[in-house]
Amino acid sequence: MHDHDHGHHQDHDHTHGQEPASDIALRVKALESLMVEKGLVDPAALDAIVDFYENKVGPRNGAQVVAKAWSDPAFRARLLADATAAIAELGYTGGQGEHMVAVENGPGVHNLVVCTLCSCYPWPVLGLPPVWYKSSAYRSRAVIDPRGVLAEFGTTLDAGAQVHVWDSTAEIRYLVIPERPSGTENLDETQLAALVTRDGMIGTARL
């Protein structure tokens, strides 16, 4: 039997954002061009933001958070109690990550994160969201059929495992702490961080 725990229950519009991706891309490009033309946005600043979150942040910040939680019980306790403050201890702060909640996988418990309204995502720890995270199919089906979605990602859970689905919003974003793989007791934090994947921190994969 599994449970669905929603961080914030809202009447979300599941038809939102269902335009073809190419159409959306054209609209975004047109809006960006108009804003640049009117001097409202510096194109170099836009490029710098995208480069920072895509190439410099990526999911490696989150991996460092998870690795420290695995190896430092005191930090793990702070992370579960106040993820925003604990993550800030490591210097990872900024837009899209002001209010964080950490949820922990364990024996018989698996957490999955979705944003049913749009694509709220913790950029400072995971970088830019993957394309599938923003898709209407994932956003609706993760709540309705989380086990089916997990199976499509190649993640099969035991029949008795509980699945908790957390709904990110503009107010709260979630970070999944995956189960620490067995046989890693002698690894240091750098080695542990190398094992952590972006999908593991969203909950669509186990390590």
Image (cartoon, helix red, strand yellow):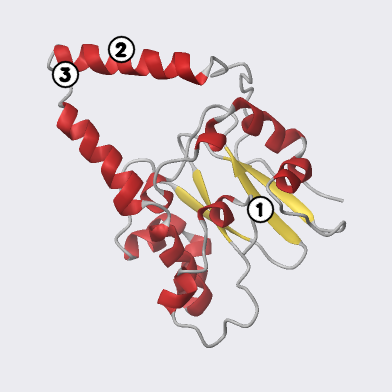
Residue type at the position of mark 3: Leu
User: Considering only order in the chain, which callout, 2 or 3, is on the residue closer to the N terminus?
Assistant: 2
- Amino acid at pointer 1: Asn
Which circle's residue, 1 or 3, is located before the other in the chain? Answer: 3
Q: Which mark is residue 40?
A: 3
**Circle nearer the N terminus (2, 1):** 2
Q: Is the residue under label 1 in contact with that under label 2 (CB below 8 Å)?
A: no
Find disc 2 in the rendering and name its residue: 30
| Residue ID for mark 1 | 111
* Residue at 60% across, 30% down: 116
Horizontal and vertical percent for residue 151? 75, 47
Q: Position of residue 143 (x, y in %)?
A: 71, 36
What separation in Å lies between label 2 and label 1 (alpha carbons)? 38 Å
C-alpha gap between disc 3 and disc 2 = 14 Å
**Few, some or many C-alpha atoms within 10 Å of disc 1 (few <14, some 14-19, many ≥20)?**
many
Residue 51, numbered label: none
Q: Nearer the viewer, mark 3 or mark 2?
A: 2
| Within-10-Å neighbours for mark 2: few <14, some 14–19, many 20+ | few
Q: Is residue 19 left or right of residue 141?
A: left
Q: In percent of the image, x 27 and y 18: which residue is there?
A: 32
Give the residue type at disc 2. Ala
- Kindly indicate whether the residue at mark 2 contacts the one at mark 3 (C-beta within 8 angstroms): no
Among all residues in the image, which is located at the extreme front? 22
Circle 1 SS class = strand
> Mark 1–mark 3 contact, CB under 8 Å?
no
Q: Quadrant of residue 103?
A: bottom right
Is residue 4 among the parts visible in the rendering?
Answer: no
Pick out the residue farthest to the left. Answer: 39
Q: Is residue 38 left or right of residue 33?
A: left
Distance from Cα at disc 1 to Cα at disc 3 = 41 Å
Work out whether 126 lies above or below 80: above
